[in-house]
Amino acid sequence: MPEPGSDHPDLNRYDDVLALLGRLPDHVPALRVVVVNGSAVTGGWDDHSDLDVEAWCTGNAATTYAAVLALAREQLGVDHVWELPETTWGPTGRQCFLHLQPDAADLSRPTRLVDLVIQQLPHRLTMDTRRHGVPLVLHDPDGLLVLEDDDEADLAAQRRQAVEQTAARRQTGAWLVERAIARGDLAEATTLHLRFAVEPLVRLLRVRHCPARHDFGLRYLRTDLPEGMAERVEALLPGPDLAVRARAAFAWQDEVLRELNQ
């Protein structure tokens, strides 16, 4: 549980979860590192945030995950669980969402939902705080987690490819959206507008304004982009004047591409 005056928000509605997480390594010795991350440490935490928990273990990740899930079911009064397919992480990890109350979409009360990821401990465990915030470390007696930036050359290459692809795809994307609108295929036009107009625009804005989180998509726009920019993006989301919004989105793409190429 965070200390009063710490940089972390009030997580008291998850006190039972945090207490269990603190005891987990006693029950599952393969666990070597357990942290809370997500909005609890990056910003934007509110009454309807889930608790993002990430843990690393030695040995078989699936076996450790099964043991942790069994303890959670036993001690947390889990209502139901969504387990992501085993192929999501491959042999090195498993992930699930633990619903600690029924009907998560009922926002008349605070949300209690845990996003749990168990992974196999890599040779060297690092976390880029620019991208993921400073984690709340619940267990790391050997100091295995190292806070350091991801390889900047690799991130720069990813950003460069994103900008190049957006510029090269610009005309094709606009044609696809306009054609679907002209044909009256509203569902197709809406999907294409998001895929080729809005999402690439946001990627460019991220490259321009928060390069370390260039690949975070449409989430966290209010915390990652300059003031007022999230509202400008939202004004381009699908609506009755989709053609006007699509053209505005592509025009904004052109503007940001010019800025990035200066």
Image: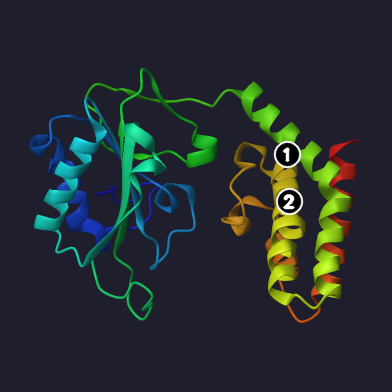
Residue 116, can we see it? no
Q: Pick the residue in front: 100 or 262.
A: 100
In three-dimensional space, the C-alpha distance between marks 2 and 1, rounded to whole angstroms, equals 8 Å
Q: Pick the residue in front: 35 or 64.
A: 64
* Mark 2 Cα shell of 10 Å, populated few (<14), some (14-19), many (≥20): many
Judge from the rendering whether residue 6 lies leftward or rightward of residue 44; answer left or right: left
Helix, strand, or loop for circle 2?
helix
Q: Specify the amino acid type for callout 1.
A: Ala
Residue 78: x percent and y percent? 18, 63
Judge from the rendering whether residue 167 lies leftward or rightward of residue 153; answer left or right: right
Q: Specify the amino acid type for callout 2.
A: Pro
Which residue is located at x 78 percent, y 40 percent?
A: 165
The correct choice, above or below, for 74 with respect to 243 in the image is above
Residue 210: x percent and y percent? 66, 43
Identify the residue position indicated by label 2 in the image: 200
Which residue is located at x 42 percent, y 64 percent?
A: 46
Numbered circle sitting on residue 204: none
Residue 9: x percent and y percent? 38, 55
Kindly indicate the quadrant of the structure image that contains residue 24: top left
Number of numbered discs: 2
Q: Pick the residue in front: 108 or 168.
A: 168
Judge from the rendering whether residue 119 lies leftward or rightward of residue 231; answer left or right: left
Q: Are marks 2 and 1 in contact (CB under 8 Å)?
A: yes
Numbered circle sitting on residue 162: 1
In what quadrant of the picture does the C terminus appear? top right
Kindly indicate the quadrant of the structure image that contains residue 215: top right
Which residue is located at x 60 percent, y 41 percent?
A: 213
The correct choice, above or below, for 108 with respect to 121 in the image is below
Judged from this view, the residue extending furthest toward the top is 123
